[in-house]
Image (spheres, grey):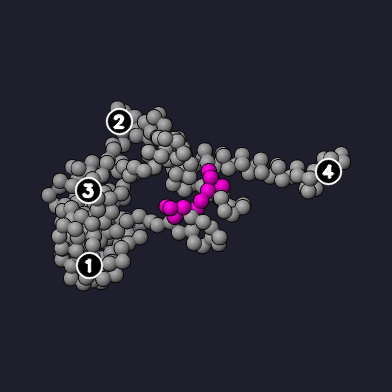
Amino acid sequence: MSPSCHLKISKDVLQIHSEHYKSTEQLQDGATLVVGAGDSGVQILSEISKTNTPVYFSGNTNITSLPQEILGKTLWWWFHKVGFLTANKYSWIGKMLSKTGQPVIGTDVKTLFKKENITCVGRTLDANAQSITFEKQEVGDIKNIVWATGFKPNFSWIDGIELDESNYPKNYRGVSKTIDGLYFLGLPWLYTRGSATLGGVQRDAKYLNTYLFKKETKKALSPHSSLFYWIYFL
């Protein structure tokens, strides 16, 4: 997902999405712009800054960052311990957590932004063949751009689906509210903050497994099913 102004940028500038970024060897000589303040953005920014070439950063600099370990325990251990990953989105703590931004994990962003070869330029506003305009300045020496701008959900290929304000399917714990027989797993905040993680998806899968078993059992024992008549006349 890149802003529309990327189409105005000179073809001499290498543009790559973070999805396809592997290493600094992919980049041309010269200054690089990294756009995006998530984990991928700051990690790529950190790696490119180690080459000592000029790097511009476009994005929010007011980021919360957390270390990978605290007091000898992994951050995920603490998240489980205090219930951050298991609080459901309908609870008080779940509603509070769902409104807060995702912290950057494992990168000290405040120290990173202070590096001499990194210039923070604010949001990307517009561009043309000669330069790119940001909130804080206009820059004309950029040779590479890494768009770490994330992904936008797209469920338009499912006929009749209704989406919520975040463009995700309306559902309760993975059960579609609008299409019978349609189920979801792995969506952000499907039920808890951990729903989109490998460690948390199992709870949602277990719930759906139980839900489907009860649904099929109820259907099988309904007066209109062949199994009902078989049991009844037995």
Q: Which of the two discs, 1 and 4, labels the residue nearer the N terminus?
A: 1
The reply, left or right, for residue 165 in relation to residue 172 is left
Q: Which of the two discs, 2 and 1, labels the residue nearer the N terminus?
A: 2
**What number is the disc on residue 61?**
3
Percent coordinates x, y for residue 3 in the rendering: 31, 63
Q: Look at the numbered disc 4 and give the secondary structure of its residue.
A: helix
State whether residue 135 is above or below residue 205: below
State whether residue 195 is above or below residue 145: above
Question: CA separation, marks 2 and 1?
Answer: 42 Å
Instruction: For residue 201, say whether it is visible.
Output: yes
Q: Residue at x 41, y 39 (%)?
A: 95
Q: Residue at x 39, y 29 (%)?
A: 82
Percent coordinates x, y for residue 185 in the rendering: 51, 47
Q: Mark 1 is on which residue type?
A: Ala
Determine whether label 2 and label 3 are within 8 Å by CB.
no
Specify the segment rendered in magenta.
164-175
**What number is the disc on residue 127?**
1
**What number is the disc on residue 53?**
none
Q: In this figure, which residue is indicated by the disc labeled 4?
A: 230
Q: In this figure, which residue is indicated by the disc labeled 2?
A: 70
Question: CA separation, marks 4 and 3?
Answer: 67 Å
